[in-house]
Image: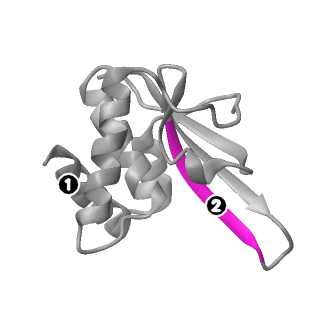
Amino acid sequence: MEAVMALTVVGVVLAVLPFRLVARLAGRVEASVQACPPPTVDATAAAVGRSVEAAARRLPWRPACLEQALAASLMLRRRGVPSHLCIGVATGDRRDFRAHAWVTAAGGTVCGGAAAAGMTPIAAFRPQGK
């Protein structure tokens, strides 16, 4: 239920606020960005990822990767688990630009990792405080 609420709130926030404000809410931008690691082995972080992905499949709308990543980031923050929200891009040619968002915590990917393969990370946000 928490994941459904987080996805709903994030969806509304993304619909009504300019992205520059959403980015500030996501946290501070990190200086270095690393490639997407394998899935996390941390039980709490993994449970958050599974919860967000399951809720996203059951909602009447299809939350995008950014909505899922923001929801997971909020849920991890609430649990006191440090995380990074990462954004990456992949390009084949000019018409094949793709972007993706994923979350890492406890040394691994929490959500969005499978689709992050082949993405070049361009930004990472670390949520502020608890």
The numbered dot on residue 56 is none
Q: Residue at x 43, y 47 (%)?
A: 69
Q: Residues within 10 Å of mark 1 (few under 14, many from 20)?
A: some
Does dot 1 land on a helix, a strand or a loop? helix
The chief SS type of the magenta part is: strand
Amino acid type at circle 2 is Ala
Range shown magenta: 96-103
Identify residue for label 1: 4
**Residue in front for this viewpoint, 97 or 37:** 37
Marks 2/1: CA distance?
24 Å
Amino acid type, residue under disc 1 in the picture: Val
Task: Identify the residue position indicated by label 2 in the image.
Answer: 99
At 20% from the left and 54% from the top, the residue drawn is 4
Decide which of 14, 5 is in the foreground and name it: 5
Sequence-wise, the earlier of marks 2 and 1 is 1
Q: Is residue 84 left or right of residue 7?
A: right
Q: Is residue 9 above or below residue 29?
A: below
How many numbered discs sit on the rendered protein? 2
- Residue 104 is situated, as x and y percent measured from the top left of the image, at 51, 32
Q: Position of residue 55 (x, y in %)?
A: 25, 55
Which residue shows up at 47% across the image and 20% down it?
106
In the image, residue 78 above or below residue 9:
above
Can you tell which quarter of the image residue 48 is in?
Answer: top left
Q: Position of residue 36 (x, y in %)?
A: 64, 37
Q: In this rendering, would 76 be left or right of 59?
A: right
* Residue at left offset 63%, top offset 31%: 37
Residue found at the very far bottom of the displayed protein: 95
